[in-house]
Image (spheres, rainbow, N blue to C red):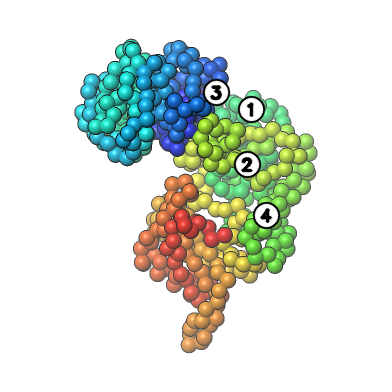
Amino acid sequence: MDYDKILILDFGSQYTQLIARRIREFKVYSEIFPYNKPISNIKDFHPKGIILSGGPSSVYDKDAPKISKEIFEIGVPILGICYGIQLITFIFGGNVHSSEKREYGFAQIEIKNVSKLFEGLQNSFQVWMSHGDKIDKLPNGFESIAFTENSPYAAIKSVDNTIWGVQFHPEVVHTTFGKDIISNFCFKICKATPNWNMGSFINQSVDTIRDAVKDKIVICGLSGGVDSSVAAVLIHRAIGDQLKCIFVNNGVLRKNEAEKVVKVFRDNFKINLKYVDAEELFLNKLEGIADPEKKRKIIGNTFIEVFEKESQKLGDVDFFAQGTLYPDVIESVSFKGPSATIKSHHNVGGLPETMKFKLIEPLRELFKDEVRELGHELGIPDDIIYRQPFPGPGLAIRIIGEVTKERLDILREADDIIVSEIKKAGLYREIWQSFGVLLPVKTVGVMGDERTYENVIALRAVNSVDGMTADWVKLPYDVLGKISNRIINEIRGINRVVYDISSKPPATIEWE
């Protein structure tokens, strides 16, 4: 089914993704285009409304991002946020100047005129400002509908109620009625229908995948993580055994992980899954290697070697599937408009360009929380859907120093205890990541009146939104005690557990 859509034109704001997320929370589909997307593409998108994001530029800068006035002639409501309101003012002949007093942080907004944008809200409330420029003259045909102490035009609208603008950021949690303002724009101004849901997404995706693949073969590197798992099950629903998944056991997985992946996807979902036990190959190549970057490269390159070899056994393959998410697409060099590039998107496993596949990326329109919701709809078990992030190089970068079978087995058992106790305490879904790190340190201990000289496990638990920054979790003492007691009592080779209480920055989440 078709669903109503709100289009966001990105001018480089760090909050642009938040706008899309807020709108999708209302069950309205939203997508982000770079500001310089051709007008034909914007029209073909058939939006119910358009939002111009904030951005770091000043409209009077020589190279400031601009848009064609044609966008305002498409015939749908437009809302400008921060840089967006200044651009609207500039395009229609108003004046924008650098302000003597930069407005950053909290401000109190006062509503002048009741309008659909502020319908149902208080006359005065807190908003979040982040701008150095200031509107000091409105264009003809516009009026002020709200102000702050420093901004006489904190919100404006055209007299025909087709163009709106706010100087503050309604998408951030710091703005008291921010969600209500975005909701009012979507529903009361754009008249959007909240018909974006995972059921409709599944139906549309199945049709799209079938149309693209036809009778060809699709391969997928299945890791057991959230993204690749959901992608595989969705594609399998569309094309059945035309999907061929490859699961590579690289020897640095968690306890019973390989068996679980095979059971869930081959036995439960009946997916055509090739299990490749390459543990010995990986461990041989890791022998004697202590440098973390060398470990990462060995694991990545060996994965490519194994995956390429196994894929060639499948004959002619036309498509490669991967679990690319919308943030990867937005942050891609090829996609971004004026925003500072955060990272380039690389395909899963860094597969070489010589493998001439067409890509199938069924999750590329979704955020992480939406992927989990989709996984629920597809019947994937919760312990996969809500699995905490796990690094590609696996336990190899949670063993400081050389990776050996013996050290892996010790860490696997410790990790299993950590995860099980965190789950028992009902904390697993509240924590971004919780895991153990095996240190290259031995300490003296006493067990049963005997002196021991054994390994140290560092326990790490952090909370984060996106992994860019993280705070250490204040785990309850009883949970820490149970984890420590079980690890020391049950695992031969460990006699000490320490807790990592560093945040990111300055530390990183992983130790290597």
Residue beneath the point at 44% across and 61% down: 502
| Alpha carbon separation for disc pair 1 and 4 | 36 Å
Q: Position of residue 220 (x, y in %)?
A: 66, 41
Residue beneath the point at 61% across and 48% down: 223
Front of the two marks 2 and 1: 2
Q: Position of residue 424 (x, y in %)?
A: 41, 59
Of callouts 2 and 1, the N-terminal one: 1
Looking at the rendered structure, the secondary structure element under dot 2 is loop
Front of the two marks 2 and 3: 3
Q: How packed is label 4: few (under 14 Cα within 10 Å), some, or many (20 or more)? A: few
Q: Residue under label 2, please give it.
A: 346
**Could you say which disc has been placed on residue 297 in the image?**
4
Of callouts 1 and 3, the N-terminal one: 3
Of callouts 2 and 3, the N-terminal one: 3
Q: Nearer the viewer, residue 251 or 187?
A: 187
| Alpha carbon separation for disc pair 4 and 2 | 15 Å
Residue beneath the point at 78% across and 43% down: 312
